[in-house]
Image (cartoon, rainbow, N blue to C red):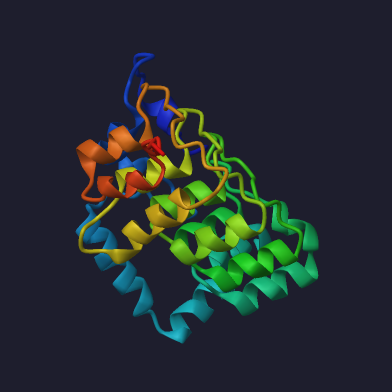
Amino acid sequence: MKKKTERDIMEFPEDFNQLELLNTHGHLIPRGASSLWNGSKDEEEDMEEEEAEHSEEWYLEKEETLNDKPAELLLWAAENNRLSTVHQVLTADPLLVHCCDEDGYTPLHRAAYGGHVDVVSALLAAGSKVNPRTIDGWTPLHSACRWSRITVASFLLQHGAELNAQTNGGLTPLHLAASHTSASKTDSAHTLELLLSQRHLKAGLRSNSGETASELARRSGPHHFLFEMVEDSVNVLLVS
């Protein structure tokens, strides 16, 4: 049975705030082939630690169960930083680099939100598009910025990622970076700095709820001061 998407499950007025929705219903953002995210930020970190503790035998057993489902195997391998498996699957069928799950998440999306830059590099080298869209309009850069994966975000930008891409709800990567900052995680501030330093950034783009990334950062994060990087300079007239 097809997994319901965010818009299948809930109905919203036209002016709903999608960023507040992410905070309250972030468990609906797919992070795996069949999982629903339902934790707080602390639980996110705990889960990352748990994933890192899996033994090599666990990974091999998981790969064995997916051997007859190469698309699922590639998606799983990209998410779990199994670079050799990614190479093996794509060697057997190069076109699988364009596969996606039922929500439109490609292997590149999976590797991006996992922060796996070597896998990202391998997928792009194998012909992956750099700006594929999920059914909600997310690009891999959106995914990387949502999870403060600064190395991946930088790599994607260097390879043509759309800096100002907007989701179906009007969210840019900058909106997502601004809405998920943490004073205790330096990568969240660095991700904002990376985006704000980009020459072609359109920092004033508004989401469907009418909010800019700067306005969002002012009310939801500790790093609003970073937006001074893109504020208009004060013109000073020199009097001779």
Q: Is residue 65 left or right of residue 132?
A: left
Front residue of 43/199: it is 199
Q: Residue at x 58, y 48 (%)?
A: 101
As drawn, the residue found furthest toward the front would be: 240
* Quadrant position of residue 120: bottom right
- For the question of whether residue 176 can be seen, the reply is yes
As drawn, the residue found furthest toward the bottom would be: 56
Q: Residue at x 22, y 52 (%)?
A: 40
* Quadrant position of residue 122: bottom right
Q: Residue at x 27, y 33 (%)?
A: 20
- Give coordinates of residue 4: x percent, y percent: 45, 34
- Give coordinates of residue 117: x percent, y percent: 55, 69
22 over 84 or under it: above or below: above
Number of marks in the rendered image: 0
- Give coordinates of residue 177: x percent, y percent: 38, 48
The quadrant of the image that shows the C terminus is top left
- Give coordinates of residue 3: x percent, y percent: 47, 39
Front residue of 93/13: it is 13
71 over 80 or under it: above or below: above
- For the question of whether residue 27 can be seen, the reply is no
Front residue of 134/176: it is 176
Q: Residue at x 51, y 36 (%)?
A: 202
178 over 51 or under it: above or below: above
